[in-house]
Image (tube, coloured by chain):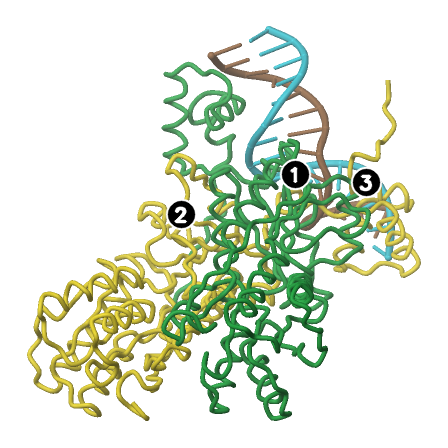
Chain colours: A yellow, B green, C brown, D cyan
Amino acid sequence: MELPATNNNPATIQDVADLAGVSIATVSRVVNGKSPVVPETAQRVMDAIRQLNYVPRAAARILASKRTDTLGLIVPEISGEFFAPMLRGIEAAAGEAGFDLLIHTTAYKKPDMRRHTLGEHNTDGLLVFIGSMEQAELERLGSIGFPVVFLHQTAPEGLDIPVVTVENKKGAMLAVEHLIEAHGCRRILYLSGPEGNEDSSWRERGYRLALEKYNIPFDPALVVPGNFSTRQAAQSMTETLAGGLEFEAIFSGDDLAAVGAMSALREAGLRIPEDVKIVGFDDVPLARHLTPPLTTVHAPTEEVGRTATDLLVRLVRREAVEREILLPTELTIRQSCGCGNG
Amino acid sequence: MELPATNNNPATIQDVADLAGVSIATVSRVVNGKSPVVPETAQRVMDAIRQLNYVPRAAARILASKRTDTLGLIVPEISGEFFAPMLRGIEAAAGEAGFDLLIHTTAYKKPDMRRHTLGEHNTDGLLVFIGSMEQAELERLGSIGFPVVFLHQTAPEGLDIPVVTVENKKGAMLAVEHLIEAHGCRRILYLSGPEGNEDSSWRERGYRLALEKYNIPFDPALVVPGNFSTRQAAQSMTETLAGGLEFEAIFSGDDLAAVGAMSALREAGLRIPEDVKIVGFDDVPLARHLTPPLTTVHAPTEEVGRTATDLLVRLVRREAVEREILLPTELTIRQSCGCGNG
DNA sequence: TTGTACGCGTTATCAG
DNA sequence: CTGATAACGCGTACAA
């Protein structure tokens, strides 16, 4: 026996077509506005749509059209200060290009729970943040030409994947050179990031280059782990201070670690910048509000997100794109380095 | 960079079935692990899957099963300090429950570009942040029983939509009472949030209640717009100061505005807390690192995200849920209010 | 335990 | 300009 159409079931394109007295093809046309439709007919269809509260089903659309209109973002976890601006850039650029954003964090999932939801059949392209995806999966995507863009991470050997990041090395050099030139520092500590972190190793490279330039010997004891984390940096610095290591300044791999270092310094009775000068990296929003305001290398984080997304969109559209984009960094001088009224 | 060659025939379930010498139903079974399959057969299928790099297409799956396994999040925009912790809570809870997260910001889209992607056909449920969705659309979703949970926003009249937010009123009272009781303030300025913002109006209510409790008359001139924004709060305060308004303390509707107010105060030559005491709201990560460290009402923002997501998941599963959850706030006393070494 | 056949709701292709 | 109709890839009764 036939059941009458219940209100429970959402309207489909067929329902709309029936009510408007046209075919589903015509409904599709007015919904997508691609092909011309006689205004009068179009109006009837639109009325039917409104009356039935019709909303096209994305899944059916995707299945038929083979386009998802969504971009995937894969990150290890959502860490506050640094991540928010980047996400804003990504979302803005994606939205402007007409894409939705599907976020996938790898940190919270048990390995066996990770589904392939962000693979090539569920997004049109992928934004992959530093170290958040397995090598094998990346290679698979790369080999079939699926659009992928890396953020703050260069492509593995042999994979032709574009990268967007910042001028880490140059920024670091700028910072350290400033400490040397403007403030006469020679014993400068480097507060490093997580083991193996690409940003951190480029920044360390810049640090060493600046040292070399001024014939200051590199002292491995001056590289202290900060882990890009306020807490860990504070702890590290406290231990270092207790160990009696001598230094005049700190170049911190990132601002959050710099904050931790400043706390530790202060607790040890050291004044900033009189006793120890410090320069950070990233220029997170908080940096200017610290006391003293933190001199830091400004990294255009939101711009990184935006640029990477634009690039990915072009990749999705099979347009030609650059292989590597390094966004410029610059030294933002405030007072923690000893400048100004410091 | 060269255009990658597109592989236009990714493996389908049929390909796998053919290679393994079974039917697609069997492939489906081993992929989803629901029905029993002879181990030997299952192994053949899995080999075929690996060999063909088979990944099920989400769209087809959704279409057939009518479940998306993704949750939608609608926010006006991604604002740094406050949003990141909430997003972390949401993502963590969603991930643990096996859902993906589709993010949709309304601020960046031109109205005509907004698609209905987050409607009932593309997600299993929706998390809606304060004021980011049109009333009509909400009512439509509500009327068909689509799972929706509000964040920091109570449901419109007549709609039975659960809410998760924090104890705004109580937190505000705590803050203002502290200023009155512990520091003897009587002329306390309220730095309000955006016009019509629900959090802000609850906080203002708490502020006025505290005043009443101590028989301090409410002076409308003491309510100054801060817009939950550092810059706007700074500007507002500068103007207010120039206008000669007298006050002993500021209760700021949120921490970011407090930061702006502190800048303005300092620029006007006022000391904190000697000349003006200040208390914020939210306890963003930056608060403890300000000088002086900001006394503020701690709001469990990450917990809000997590709780709301858990609730939404239960709603999706058609389980019974609470209608309103108010997460507790508490006063975190640091030094900007005059306590400690202030 | 496995296979067959149909349905899910759109878009795209071709005739008319 | 409009209408049939064939994909699209997978889940799932139902049958074997």
Q: Is residue C2 above or below residue A338?
A: above
Relative depth, front residue between B220 and B299: B220
Q: Chain of mark 2?
A: A
Q: Is residue B17 above or below residue B203?
A: above
The amino acid sitting under disc 2 is: Thr
Please identify the quarter of the rendering in which residue B176 is found: bottom right
Q: Is residue B16 visible?
A: yes
Relative depth, front residue between A222 and A100: A222
B173 with respect to C13 (left or right): left
Element carrying mark 1: loop
Foreground disc of the pair 1, 2: 1
Label placed on residue B322: 1
- Same chain for labels 2 and 3? Say yes or no: yes
Q: x and y percent of residue A314 in the render?
A: 51, 66
Q: Earlier in the sequence, mark 2 or mark 3?
A: 3
B16 with respect to B117 (left or right): left
Element carrying mark 2: loop
Relative depth, front residue between B211 and A75: B211
- The residue singled out by tag 2 in the image is A106
B213 with respect to A92 (left or right): right
Q: x and y percent of residue C7 in the render?
A: 72, 28
- The residue singled out by tag 3 in the image is A14
Badge 1 vs badge 2, beta-carbon distance below 8 Å: no
Q: x and y percent of residue B172 in the render?
A: 60, 62
The amino acid sitting under disc 3 is: Gln
Q: Tell me how far mark 2 sits from mark 3, CA to CA.
A: 40 Å
Would you call the spot at circle 2 few (<14 residues within 10 Å), some (14-19), or many (20 or more)? some
Q: Chain of mark 1?
A: B
